Amino acid sequence: MVSTLLPGILILLMFSFAVGRDLTRGATPPTGDYACSNYMCINATLTGDMVEYTLSSTGKRNPGWMAVGFGTQMSNNPMVILWSNSDGSITLSQRVARSWVMPEVVPDPPRIATLSSDLSTASADKHTFNIPWDNSVKTNLIWAFGTQNPGSSAVDAPFQFHLDAGYAHFDLSKPLSASSKSDSSEVSSAPSNVAPASNPISPSSLTSTSTLPLNAHQRMAVAHAVFCTAGFLVFLPVGALVSRWVRTFTSAWYTAHWILQFVVAGPSIIIGLAFGVQTVNNGRIVEHPNDEHKKWGIILFALYICQCALGALVHWVKPKNSTGRPLQNYLHAGFGLILIGLGFYQVHSGYKKEWPETVGRADLMRDADLIWYIWIVVVLALYSAGLILLPKQLRQEAELRSMKEVATKEEQSSLLAESQPEEIGMHKIYRDRREYLIPV
Ligand SMILES: *[C@@H]1O[C@H](CO)[C@@H](O)[C@H](O)[C@H]1NC(C)=O
């Protein structure tokens, strides 16, 4: 009886031992996953209840810092950021980003990452750390790669925005090949002889956010940028150029000027502003006008409204009996140029600072600098060139003044006598001239 049961019991014991071994994992060969993006690779190895992460550079760019985070998005998820220092040490900083701003240091993270100095190379291209396993083989990761070294070994050192970033889905249960311990030349020299179990694992993919379509939040920032840039850097400068260039040729300049500055630029600026406000509201940043770009945005909008009011004043309220140009005309012109200058400043801080901080896709703004500089030069050159018309304009204005004097005298005399045909002609010229000479 016992002799017949014994083999069965033995088999059962062996079976449960095998299952137990498998569950404790400690005795099983390590498993893990890895993936590479354009600039960096992440290798994860699960051994027992620890996961070893290695962030390495693909060699395309020198890493300034590399980061991996746990979760599917940047905000409110733990991150481990690593960079090497000039003294050969490596800083490991555990942080969390509360919103779209600079991640803060977490002094006592739930899972403490420890740098494994022996596996990390200070030559900056490979950093390894260990972190307790969270008991799930399917792990969502976010990652980022920056080219600018923080320049400090302090764990709370601020760092520049990333060059590339994205996410990955790791499966830590993939068996790692035994041959991964041996050098790569051996593996590549005899690929056909390698048994399936020792084949290198197929990598997961590191999805770079720079290859993804923009999300709703990012699209809103794009809409803000398009409308505000069109308003401040296209319509306002063109409107100013029209008043500079066309005024000495036709009285229609004034209609074109106010339509551009008010009817076209106005809605564009207001729509752009609305998208900007909405982008900030969706960005979950607690303090709203918290940086230069947002403060200047509000100031700029107020200045634009003032400039429109001043323009209306110049047009509708003309000082009586004034000789020469009233002060408000100069004010309106000068103010307009300042407004356009501020618009250039604002667009610059928008694409240079605001865009990478809130949207991240620095790749989309690669040529912005070039276009910005070219456009400044073009606008300045066209406006300055328009000043060659100034003598002509002054001549016309002097002519107008003398005509005005004549006309005033004639008006007085025509109260007594009927107008002569020549005088009617003179009045007509005077009225035509007046239309395009008096308003700025
Ligand atoms: C990451 O894993 C792959 C596949 O096992 C291996 O070829 C590569 O050398 C590993 N990289 C690092 C930095 O360990």
Image: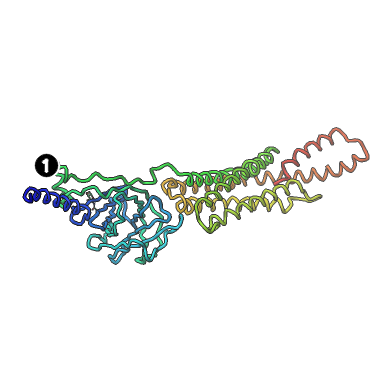
Residue pushed farthest top? 421
Q: How many marks can you see?
A: 1
Pinpoint residue 83: horizontal percent, then vertical percent.
Answer: 32, 60
Q: Residue drawn 40% across and 43% down? A: 212
Q: Residue drawn 72% across and 41% down? A: 436
Apparent side of residue 333 relative to residue 47 in the rendered image (left or right):
right
Pinpoint residue 138: horizontal percent, then vertical percent.
Answer: 31, 49
Callout 1: CB less than 8 Å from ligand 1: no
Res 237 seen here: no
Pinpoint residue 170: horizontal percent, then vertical percent.
Answer: 30, 48
Q: Nearer the viewer, residue 379 or 142?
A: 142
- Describe the colour scheme in one phrase: rainbow
Pinpoint residue 49: horizontal percent, then vertical percent.
Answer: 26, 58
Q: Nearer the viewer, residue 51 or 425?
A: 51
Q: Residues within 10 Å of mark 1 (few under 14, many from 20)?
A: few
Image position of 431 with respect to 138: above or below: above
Q: Nearer the viewer, residue 35 or 250?
A: 35
Residue pushed farthest left? 3
Q: Residue drawn 68% across and 43% down? A: 392
Q: Amino acid at mark 1?
A: Asn
Res 94 seen here: yes
Residue pushed farthest front? 1
Under tag 1, what secondary structure?
A: helix
Q: Nearer the viewer, residue 410 or 355?
A: 355
Which residue position is annotated with label 1?
A: 193
